[in-house]
Image: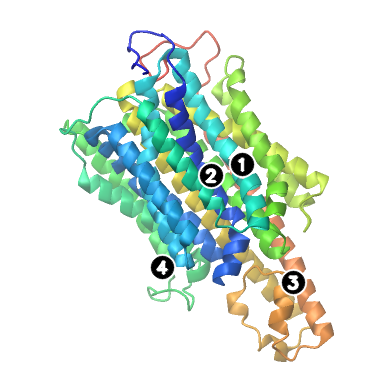
Amino acid sequence: MTTQPSPHTDERVSWIPMVALFLAQMLMSFNVAALPVSIGGMVEDFGVPPTAVSTAIVTYGLVVAALVMVGAKLGHRIGWIVVFRFVVAAFAGSALMMILAPSVTWVIAAQAVAGASAAIIVPSLVALIAANYRGAQQATAVGSLGSARALSGVSAFLIGGTLGTFVGWRPVFMVVLALAIAVFLFSFRLHSAAGDKSVQIDVLAALLIGSGIVALTLGFNNLNGWGVLQATGAAPFDIGGLSPAPVLVLIGIVLGQAFFVWTRHRTRTDKVPLVSLSVFGSSRERAAVYAMFVVVSLEAALNFTVPLYIQIVQGRTPFDTSLAMLPFNLTVFITATLVVRFYKRFSPRVIGVSSFTLTTAALLWLSFVVTNNWETLPTIFGLIVFGIGQGALVTLVFNVLVTAAPKELAGDVGSVRGTTQNLASAVGTALAGAMLVGILSLNVGQAVINDVAIPDRLIAQVDLDQVNFISNDQLREVLSRTDASDAEVDAAVQINTDARLRALKLGLLILAGISAVAILPASRLPGYRPGEIPERPGLVTSSAD
């Protein structure tokens, strides 16, 4: 039986407990990565547009981000081991819901359950690492979470793509179920202090941050459907003709600010806040949070965009998707694993700025060279370069946060990481869908008006208010129900092809601009050099700034 290490010793202990935490990170990441691969199968099974599947991805991230801070306090109060096992079992239940789902509504509900479970798993990972490992082993354990996340991305696309093509999308989530069972069994080798029933949960802060995140995510996710400014017919209501989507975004920002004001008040009056703001009290920690948000948003946008084009636009298989994404995901995994070797030679600031420069250059390159065929060498090169920058950043910014925090704030570090990553993932996916569909709608509308080969009588028979991504075969099927001639069908298919590609190129160009702006917060990351790092009582003192 593994004994819990003393806080005053660097004695090496068994890595078996870490297996549970490594697999738990893989469990969450595999589940999220499997959803984009399954887009084609779900669209075909349930007869829904691809944006409906993206809602399931957004739902997962939304629930995690809204509840993770409460999850951290529940872990302190109940005990990390007990609550960890309970939520892993709940995650297994969500996998069963996915396997048996009769409709996309069940898929969305299953991801809500998975998100609620992950809201406790995320802070548990950091807290349990702190409880089970010390010194160099602890630093290695923290770094392995980034590797687990990247490895799950590779395996999800390979396994998911293969199963999705030759068997179906549902067996992909049997892998999620198997991972959950394995995590539960290995969790009996973990150790942690008992829960502290005196820990209180700041209910008002939980409501403020939870409501703010829900409002932000719903607003971003419905910008396209409800209208960016003016309300569309699909909007549930309007405010003097104004779309509720930007209003929700504004409400979310206000509630977020109210959360910070209330938390500072609790701290000044010596009351325990929902999360300690000292976790990102300095400009360095805040820079790490900003950088984490941007890079995860960019990753989520790309992970949604590529499967969308390959499976829906090109009408190809999930296996083709896995092959197209393999260079990117493999590069992320290798980079996330090896980047820690550069920490002794380069400061976080240098690595961060260089990595965002790479992601910006890669997205800019892709916006010019990408075509409707993802297997071209220039496209693969762009994905690899983006993967190098992204893999380095995800591991780096997490390391900056955990190494700056005292051990007793390990749960708070985990909750901040979970809130940032999952809100960023939800916002990135939502914005990618809204942005691409919005650009596509504008492109199609302009092309139809300017194309003399598309007569007014045909335009009247097609609903241009509901433009979405469809394959050319699907478009031909839609036009077969009209009186369009063969020449008119060919013209419409060409418009669809050109409009989709222009939407993709412009979307990648916008993402490149976002990545370039992120270089600014990256320049505020710690700038210490090897040998200049002062020792302090952080989670991993050997890397504190």
Report if the CB atoms under discs 2 and 1 are less than 8 Å apart: yes
Residue 515 picture location, percent across and down: 60, 42
- In the image, residue 449 sits, relative to residue 44, either above or below, namely below
Q: Identify the amino acid type marked 4.
A: Pro
Gap in angstroms between the C-alphas marked 2 and 1:
8 Å
Mark found first going from the N terminus, 4 or 3: 4
Mark found first going from the N terminus, 2 or 4: 2
Q: Which residue is mark 4?
A: 244
Residue at horizontal 66 percent and vertical 88 percent from the top: 461
Gap in angstroms between the C-alphas marked 4 and 3:
33 Å
The image quadrant of residue 371 is bottom right
Image quarter where the C terminus lies is: top left
Q: Which residue is mark 1?
A: 155
Residue 355 relative to residue 250: left or right: right
- Is residue 263 shown to the viewer in this render? yes
For the residues carrying marks 4 and 3, which lies nearer the camera in this image?
Answer: 3
Q: Which mark is residue 472?
A: 3
Mark found first going from the N terminus, 1 or 3: 1
Q: Identify the amino acid type marked 1.
A: Ser
Report if the CB atoms under discs 1 and 3 are less than 8 Å apart: no
Residue 263 picture location, percent across and down: 25, 39
Residue at horizontal 61 percent and vertical 68 percent from the top: 44
Q: Identify the amino acid type marked 2.
A: Phe
Mark found first going from the N terminus, 1 or 4: 1
10 Å crowding of disc 2: few (<14), some (14-19), many (20+): many
